[in-house]
Amino acid sequence: MSVRVKSLDARQFDLWWINGWRRQRPGKVSISSKAQNHKMNLADHKRWIAWIAQLRLMHPVPGVVLMAFSILISILCSAGPGTQAFAQSSGGGKGTVTGLKLPRYVSLKASRVNLRKGPGTKYPIAWVFRQAGLPVEIIAEFEAWRQVRDSEGTKGWVLRSLLSGRRTVQVTPWDANGKKERPRIALTTRASHSAPVVVLVEAGVIADVKSCDGQWCYVGISKFNGYLPQNKLWGVYKGEAVN
């Protein structure tokens, strides 16, 4: 008996943007991990924009050409570093402000979050996160600021008010960086590799955590709900139970 399985592959259909997801024509959904490549290096971006402005003063380049080139530079600068994800550990102490466990996972509350080089607005912005719901790991606290790192290991300080206790995860983000063809894993109806497949999920996709038992997590992705192996997710610790 053959089973038809929908695949969360963003490259096969005409797509449009909806809240950071890429959705196909009605009846089928595609979740793009590329849409969730959500980090922009401001220093590089500003340097390129300044160079473009200087070029325009020196040479009569058509405005439409400069606009297209500016868009290209923005896209290139938005890619995060291709570093390997940090090893996840549930060990550590407690926060000096909240008394909560460190490290611990949270998610971004806003769709634009400035990642600063220090705990205060006087410190320069190193990166900008552009995806609400992105899981990050709090590793330090200072007054109203939290030092966080993402799945690529990028660290910085953000305001506490821009973080949420809602638990989310990224699907195998270590398989998404710099790869043209991103692997996919099965979202299943039960906590078993032999269970029926609900949908195939591309590496890098963000999912909402509903519960975890240390081996499997029950998650929601767009309109789909099902189980994913916990060791394939960044945003929960090995053996951690989430209720």
Image (cartoon, helix red, strand yellow):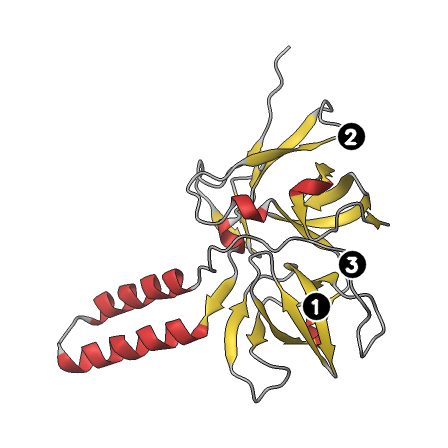
Q: Tell me the kind of residue under disc 2.
A: Arg
Q: Is residue 180 above or below residue 169?
A: above
- Give the residue number, with chain letter if any, for mark 1: 139
Q: What is the x, y in percent for residue 156?
A: 59, 72
Quadrant of res 117? bottom right
Secondary structure under the numbered disc 1 in the rendered image: strand
> As drawn, is 127 to the left or to the right of 223?
left
Q: Is residue 205 above or below residue 163?
A: above
Residue name at image x 41 percent, y 76 percent:
43
Question: How far, Cα to Cα, is label 1 from label 3?
Answer: 11 Å
- Give the residue number, with chain letter if any, for mark 3: 91
Q: What is the x, y in percent for residue 18?
A: 55, 54
Q: Earlier in the sequence, mark 1 or mark 3?
A: 3
* Rendered image: mark on residue 36: none
Residue 14 or residue 39, whichever sits in front: 39
Q: Earlier in the sequence, mark 2 or mark 3?
A: 3
Q: Earlier in the sequence, mark 1 or mark 2?
A: 1
Q: What is the x, y in percent for residue 129?
A: 55, 66
Quadrant of res 7? top right
Residue name at image x 64 percent, y 10 percent:
1
Q: Residues within 10 Å of mark 3 (few under 14, many from 20)?
A: few
Question: How far, Cα to Cα, is label 1 from label 2?
Answer: 33 Å
Q: What is the x, y in percent for residue 49?
A: 32, 75
- Give the residue number, with chain letter if any, for mark 2: 190
Q: Tell me the kind of residue under disc 3.
A: Gly
Residue 204 or residue 130, whichever sits in front: 204
Question: How far, Cα to Cα, is label 2 from label 3?
Answer: 30 Å
Secondary structure under the numbered disc 2 in the rendered image: loop
Q: Residues within 10 Å of mark 1 (few under 14, many from 20)?
A: many
Quadrant of res 116? bottom right
